[in-house]
Image: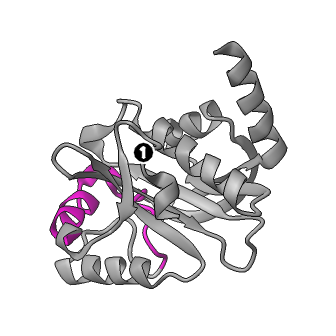
Amino acid sequence: MADFFQGKSKRIVLQAFEPEQISALHAHLNHPALAGRRYIPWEFPDDLPLSYQQVEAVYKTWADQKKGFNLALVLPEGKELIGHISCDWGWDTFCPQVSMVVYPDYQRRGYGGEVLQTVLDYLFHHTPAYNISGWIADWNRPALEFALKVGFTQCGKSRRVRFRNGIYTDSILVDLLREEWLTTQVESSHGA
């Protein structure tokens, strides 16, 4: 898998997390703008500050994952950590779930789209993935708009599954099927 990602993105390096990135990860995960949308393992609070030890445990959980991957998004020039992407196929390699975070200081620069296209290309061309999905909090409108823009379809919702700012909120399910992805690839190659 590591060889696949080499050179696929001109502006971002996708790599396994390394222990020396824990301090930067700690700072980024505690950025107030990421509260409730850090996409870290379920056993850690997603909207409360994390201690350094908790971030070390997040790193260890990611490093020990057997059915999926967690990659750091790094700028090649200075090796600066700018986000992370996770893929978890749990019990079914045909239907992985993907989540991605570009840290606030690096958002709206096209990094997310570039990284997601690279990972989708990997999953649809080098794994048996048929349906790739993700969950987005209903209050996170920019993330939903981004997912729809890159080809995902809103296909479901879990109602009142989170409690945020004194109200119950929904989680929206988005997915992308292999044939939809392949159709967009053919269309974009004809338009190039």
Q: Quadrant of residue 179?
A: top right
84 with respect to 123 (left or right): left
Mark 1 is on which residue type?
Answer: Gly
For the magenta stretch, what is the residue range? Answer: 22-42
User: In the picture, residue 160 is in which quadrant?
Assistant: bottom right
Rendered location of residue 137, percent (x, y): 55, 53
> Quarter of the image containing the C terminus?
top right
Q: Residue 39 magenta-drawn?
A: yes
Give whichever of 68, 4 is nearer the camera: 4
What residue is shown at x 68% (from left), y 36% (from top)?
A: 151
SS of the residue at dot 1?
loop
Residue at (21, 71) in percent of width and height: 22
Is the residue 86 above or below the residue 41 in the image?
above
**For the image shown, how many numbered marks are present on the structure?**
1
Q: Is residue 38 left or right of residue 171?
A: left
Q: In this image, 141 relative to 71: left or right?
A: right
Residue 37 on the magenta segment: yes
Relative height, residue 159 to residue 189 (above, below):
below
Q: Which residue is mark 1?
A: 7
175 or 6, which lies in front? Answer: 6
Towards the viewer: 138 or 4: 4
